[in-house]
Amino acid sequence: MTAEIISGTQIRETILAELKDEVKQMQTKYGKVPGLVTILVGENPASISYVTLKIRTAESLGFYEVQDNQPADIAEANLLALIEKYNKDPKIHGILVQLPLPKHIDEKKVLNAINPNKDVDGFHPVNVGRLMIGGSEVLYPPCTPAGIQELIVRSGTETSGAEVVVVGRSNIVGKPIAVMMAQKGPGANSTVTIVHTRTKDLASHCKRADILIVAAGVPDLVKPEWIKPGATVIDVGVNRVGMTDKGKAILKGDVDYDKAKEIAGKITPVPGGVGPMTITMLMKNTVRSAWFHFGGK
Ligand code: NAD
């Protein structure tokens, strides 16, 4: 049996259409739209391309989008003052500081300076705490884990009582998605195991998984024989394994996709699976923030 492919590219389009509708409803109700500021420090080419994609997506949804580019030698105090300006700006609901920042700037200090109620990336310790509490406390789930959960739910995978195994324990993917899937509530209620570099017998844990979420950053780490027949496999890994003749990066996930798709029930491809979901969820968080600041739907 060949697995059903969970297309992040298609699910992204559905969610973006839903968000566009919400922006229209917001305009009707409040006469206002969500506001997002993207702060880019310096001219790192990868950062420029990420920010450009975020700006284009925000504009396509009808957001008020402010692009604030700063020179690489901006003083930390000036960057903190800039964030404070947007913290107070009533037209801005989401503040996004593109990482990495130049070495002379303390990244943690900068991220912690963002008003947690405008932290649409969900990285502020207050939002990490809210995620841990769960339920209505959660304002902004971090974008990649939120995208993973959308893929699981929208592909029709049952999560309640499911055995979920998460490979990886990073702060941006592994830990938050494990917490989210274990919470009480729709799209969750799972029994979760986190495995990592110190885990004994990775394979035996993976074999138990009804839902296997892999975020290790190791190409082909998960072998086809580790997959339970019919399982839903979410491959978060993005590994550059070479270059095409035209100089384009060849990407591979953490799962041996070609063989795994003959065993899994549902599987995400790389690219085109989790990847397109991250920016989509950033947009969703910005819409959520705008509703929150305007006083509700
Ligand atoms: P990370 O390096 O911070 O964490 C990797 C985790 O995997 C660690 O906790 C480590 O213990 C575990 N791990 C590594 N090798 C392992 C092994 N051999 N066996 C068991 N566990 C192992 O990485 P991250 O930031 O969580 O990202 C993971 C992958 O997901 C990367 O390939 C990254 O590029 C990708 N990623 C994709 C998106 C997206 O598509 N939007 C977003 C974030 C990360």
Image (cartoon, helix red, strand yellow):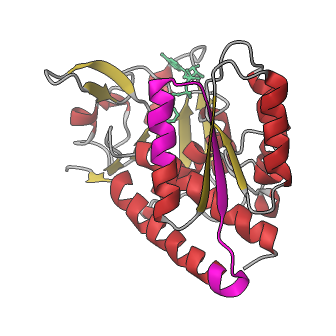
First to last magenta residue range: 27-54
Residue 97: tell me if it is visible: yes
Task: Report the residue that reaches farthest toward the bottom.
Answer: 28
Q: Position of residue 272 (x, y in %)?
A: 33, 45
Where is residue 159? Give x, y as percent. 55, 57
Instruction: Give the left or right position of residue 66, taking residue 30 as reference.
Output: left
Looking at the figure, which quarter contains the C terminus?
Answer: bottom right
In the drawing, does residue 281 fall left or right of residue 178? left
Decide: is 33 above or below 90. below
Q: Is residue 267 left or right of residue 114?
A: left
Q: Relative to residue 255, is residue 242 depicted above or below? A: above
Q: Quadrant of residue 36?
A: bottom right
Q: Seen in the image, is 270 located left or right of residue 285?
A: left
Q: Nearer the viewer, residue 206 or 119?
A: 119
Task: Identify whether 18 is placed above or below 44.
Answer: below
Quarter of the image holding residue 84?
top right
Q: Nearer the viewer, residue 204 or 104?
A: 104
Residue at 65% x, 79% y is: 26
Residue 158 is one of the magenta-drawn residues: no
Q: Residue at x 60, y 56 (%)?
A: 65
Residue at image location 85% in from the left, 26% down from the top: 77
